[in-house]
Amino acid sequence: MACEFKLRRQVEFAETDMAGIMHFANYFRFMEEAEHAFFRSLGLSIHMKTDEGLVTWPRVHAECDYLLPLRFEDDVEVHLRVQERKPKAIHFHFVFRRLNASPPEEVARGRVITVCVTYDPAAGRMSAIEIPPAVAALIEPAPQAGFAPAQEAR
């Protein structure tokens, strides 16, 4: 069973503002990319057909605390950890680290809560469901020892 995943990428110019600092909204894009890559690493998708029908994972909560800025061409690691798995939801915790700093430094922390739903395209409605057993069998919460408070910004 998996409880964490690391995504490494570089900050692109289009993700920054006029000062070359990554725009705050892109942290949420990075968290979503890490979540999708985590699901793919398990042979899953966040939009897939199952015995329960078309299953997807909308966000019901998202937050991010910014400690230090990321800049154009910074190498960043987005560390996803499963904080909690409930019957119908998964709570993800994210730590962003700038890897081209010496030593690597934590620059942000985020949290996203997703709910497992079926989607009926004809009715245009989503309904929360229990996480399918085949999916739940692959995902477990990470040990709580890894959820230390964020470091203070310098």
Image: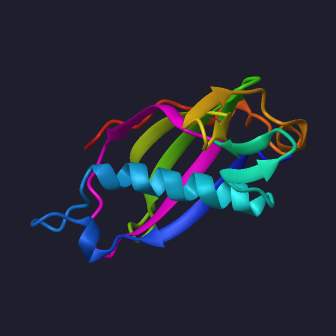
Residue 106 in view in this figure? no
Residue in view at x 26 percent, y 55 percent: 69
Instruction: Please tell me in which quadrant of the rendered image residue 146 appears.
Output: top right
Position of residue 124 relative to residue 35, above or below, is above
Farthest residue, direction front: 122
What secondary structure do most residues of the magenta stretch adopt?
strand
Residue in view at x 45 percent, y 67 percent: 99
Question: Percent x, y for residue 102?
Answer: 41, 67
Q: Nearer the viewer, residue 69 or 57?
A: 57
Question: Percent x, y for residue 95?
Answer: 50, 47
Question: Percent x, y for residue 114?
Answer: 59, 35
Residue 116 in view in this figure? yes
Indicate left or right for 127 with 129 as reference.
left
Residue range of the region highlighted in magenta in the rendering:
57-82
Question: Percent x, y for residue 111?
Answer: 49, 35
Position of residue 148 relative to residue 1, above or below, is above
